Amino acid sequence: MIFYFSATGNSRHVATKIADALGENAVSITDCFKKDFCNFLADKSENIGFVFPVYNFGLPITVIDFIKRMNIKTNGNYIFTVATYGGFSGGASKIIKNELAKKNITVNAQYSVRMPDTWTPAYDVSDKEKNAKINAAADKKTDKIIKKIKKHSTGNFDSRRIPFGDKFYGGYESLRRTSSLSVEDNCIGCGLCAKECPVDAIEIQSGKPVWVKDKCAMCLGCLHRCPQFAIQRGSKTKEHGQYIHE
Ligand SMILES: Cc1cc2nc3c(=O)[nH]c(=O)nc-3n(C[C@H](O)[C@H](O)[C@H](O)COP(=O)(O)O)c2cc1C
Ligand code: SF4
Ligand code: SF4
């Protein structure tokens, strides 16, 4: 069973690639929330994985909430985490290991994969060729991870972690303010942003998205998926482009 959270497809791609190679199921954390279903019984032979994007050197709030709510009966399973990141995974591996330990789940191995950086307030994803090269390297890295998982290797193989990286994670709280998101006049009111938001932070009112929660996961899924590219966060996102893993 491979649990994943993904706003723009990177972590979903890695999770399904691993699940396919192992003959296991990839389970969407967002779907679990939407169906209010977080109870699982693991078969003895199953590997259990958590695949997620790094946010602010840590974890999306959705992953933390899922781990808190999930009820999984393990049975001596091999347990691993995979962080997908754009530059540095920081303290993400340490944070998820600690969160899982609180649920008496001991992680056996931790991995990470570099992918296009979807934090477009700072990074540019408009070069499709560059993204394709990063994703080709990410596929090779994932193949290596799959080999390690099949051998049940143990240890921390997250090569982009930073000592004390978890100390920077506190900044995520202020980053999550929905007041930083805005919509432009070219919005056609299609409702996709509201439908796809993992935390139901958007409602369509009078044909436009309205952020109805003070804080969200700040996954930027609404910004990257909008067919009109009408959602922005600050002054740079427009020029930095939209990205979804194909
Ligand atoms: C709110 C936010 C914060 C991010 N913070 C980091 C970070 O601290 N370090 C990093 O390397 N990448 C960071 N990223 C980039 C993502 O971790 C990376 O692009 C990831 O692969 C996206 O996965 P997804 O497509 O499955 O959502 C951030 C992205 C977002 C949206
Ligand atoms: S996805 Fe874009 S076009 Fe559709 S309602 Fe949301 S902002 Fe408007
Ligand atoms: S409002 Fe947008 S950025 Fe915030 S969680 Fe929803 S989809 Fe992600």
Image (cartoon, rainbow, N blue to C red):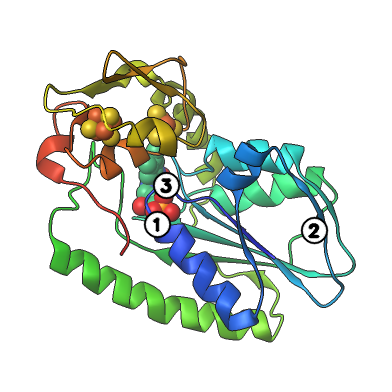
Residue visible at 52% across and 40% down in the picture:
60
Judging by the rendered image, the residue that carries numbered circle 1 is 9
Label number found at residue 244: none
In which quadrant of the rendered image does the C terminus lie?
bottom left
Residue visible at 65% across and 35% down in the picture:
65
Mark nearer the N terminus (3 vs 2) = 3
Contact, CB < 8 Å: mark 2 with mark 1?
A: no
Secondary structure beneath label 1: loop
| Disc 3 versus disc 2: nearer the observer | 3
Ligand 2 image position (quadrant): top left
Badge 1 amino acid: Gly
Mark nearer the N terminus (2 vs 1) = 1
44 and 164: which one is in front? 44
Q: Which class describes the residues within 10 Å of circle 2: few (<14), some (14-19), or many (20+)? A: some
Badge 3 amino acid: Ala
Label number found at residue 7: 3
Q: Position of residue 152 (x, y in %)?
A: 72, 80
Locate residue 112 relative to residue 151 in the image: left or right: left
226 and 104: which one is in front? 226
Indicate if the residue with disc 1 has its beta carbon within 8 Å of ligand 1: yes
In this view, 73 is above or below 102: below
Residue visible at 31% across and 48% down in the picture:
118
Indicate if the residue with disc 2 has its beta carbon within 8 Å of ligand 1: no
Label number found at residue 106: 2
Q: Is residue 64 visible?
A: no
Locate residue 236 relative to residue 178 in the image: left or right: left
Q: Position of residue 137 (x, y in %)?
A: 33, 76
Locate residue 154 relative to residue 88 in the image: left or right: right
Contact, CB < 8 Å: mark 1 with mark 3?
A: no
